[in-house]
Amino acid sequence: MARFSTKTDKPKDVKGALKRLFRYLFAHKLILIIVTVLSVFANIFALVGPKLSGNAIDVIAAGYGNVDFGKVYYYAGLMLIFYVFSSVMNYVVSTLMIIIGRKISNDMRREVFKKLTKLPVGYYDVNQTGDIISRVSYDIDVINMSLSTDFVQIISSLITISCSFGMMLYISPNLVITACITLPLSILYTKYMTGKTRPLFAKRSKKYGQLNGFSEEMFSGHKTIQAYAHEDGVIEDFYDINTEAADAFFDADYYGTIIGPSVGFINNLSLALVAMCGSFFYLFEMVTIGQISSFILYSRKFSGPVNEIANMYNEIMSALAAAERVFRLLDEDEETPDKEGAYELSEVSGKVDIEDVTFGYNPDHPVLRGMNLTAEPGSITAIVGATGAGKTTIINLLMRFYDVDKGRILLDGYDIRDIKRDDLRRAYTMVLQDTWVFAGTIRDNIAYAKKDATEEEIINAAKAARLHSYIMTLPKKYDTVIGEDGGNISKGQKQLITIARAMLVNSNMLILDEATSNVDTRTEKAIQKAMFTLMKGKTCFVIAHRLSTVRGADCILVVDNGGISECGTHDELISKKGRYYEMYMSQWN
């Protein structure tokens, strides 16, 4: 199975990112065709204006004291009509691209969220939550803004450049040569700045992800920060990370922003040359005043889009950097797919065999080494040991959150890697030390794993978890809304909700990872009675630090140094006076 790292400085593939972005665009071919056609006509109508303007000037210049104002008004009227049509079409084009941008961002977020649900637990173990959220929100928003505006602008600019150049050739090929003298300089300068600024935008996206990750961690651990009076230290750390993000933003925007004015300056030099040479050509009657006027207007039409593309460069690079971060997430290895013909669990008796299992989150540093264990159906297996001994790792392997490096784990005689992963996980019910509740009613939280649960089943589960009495004291009882992550209830109450949720699910196997760690001793004893009733006839794995809670287990495993150092019932291990005896007695002294 793939291991994950937090390293993100991978080679940038701009062409690849563009190619994948175009796939999203081309999914809306019909709208894109309409946009392209409207853009062509909108720009053609806008480009007729300078020619009509030149015609009107020539009429005035030829008439001297006897100007045919009828023709002047005629050309002016046509200009107005063409510009109105052009503006209306540009409005429609902009609206359509906003619609496409919304559809693409919606599709992309759905794809990213679907991907996140299929990534292994290991990915979340090594990536900051805030950085992941930044990709789902900020990065996709940047892509959306670029597609909604820059794409239309680029199409429009290319059409304008092509048509303007054609009109310039039609008016005066000699002036075209003059106008193009500075074009190579613009191209070379833009290419140079592209190579210089591209990594700066990638760095900016990365720094913003780190900033979001740090902020999310600090907000989640706010109580701990206050408890240790570490506010000043956190503020200093935030200042450092924020400064790095701000500096990255400044560097990228600074170098991206100077491209536009610099290219604009070069283009203005071109206009100055055109005006100077045009005056000489007029003296030799090679062009008319109206043609010079039209040519200069077309020159501005020609150079303007070049300048606009240069100004958009920072936005385009920012969007490409954001796209690379999103695509990097989409390219992460998903959980190992089920084998072809994987076994479907229908009925589970609950026999578990761990045979010579070796595993490490880092393959070079195994947490478990050659572990062996047999849990009979309906038995209660308690797993105890020092912090970091590998207790939770065993649970992770049983659920296939990770796959073993060596050896195998059997369920009812089948290697769990040959069983459909969803069936395997549905065979277990889990209550973890890290309680998880979502924003919603208490009823919805209890019934989370069984959406069709009846009111009676929900109430019975709450009663079994010793939660019903507390719920009935609330103004809205089971319809009471819990805040995000249960912020408006205590940790103990959150744990009781997760226990009630587990009691509602009728699976043949249970995993309890410090399931009563956040409740008081009196409540714990009451819950234990209910849980032992729940556990009857089911294969149970219980991780506990309070050894008094596992005295009734059929088998207690003492995990130490990557293996099982002791195994037996409570009385057997106490009589041995080994590692378990030392741990048990230490909790009473």
Image: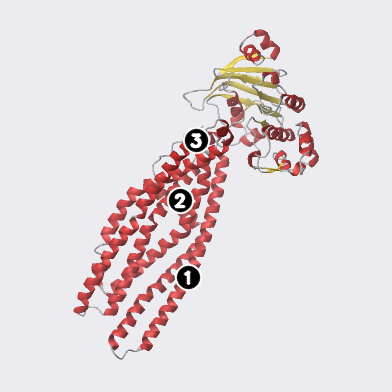
**Along the viewing direction, whichever of 315 and 233 lies nearer the viewer:** 233
Residue 89 is marked as: 1
> Whole-percent x and y of residue 213?
50, 40
Q: Which residue is mark 2?
A: 20
> Whole-percent x and y of residue 283?
19, 79
> Whole-percent x and y of residue 86?
44, 72
Q: Is residue 581 above or below residue 303?
A: above
Check the image and tell me how it is coloured. Answer: secondary structure
Q: Is residue 266 visible?
A: yes
Q: Is residue 263 above or below residue 111?
A: below
Q: Nearer the viewer, mark 2 or mark 1?
A: 1
Q: Residue at x 31, y 91 (%)?
A: 66
Q: Is residue 375 visible?
A: no
Q: Is residue 196 above or below residue 45?
A: above
Q: Which residue is mark 3?
A: 232
**Along the viewing direction, whichever of 264 and 192 lies nearer the viewer:** 264
Looking at the rendered structure, the kind of residue marked 3 is Asp
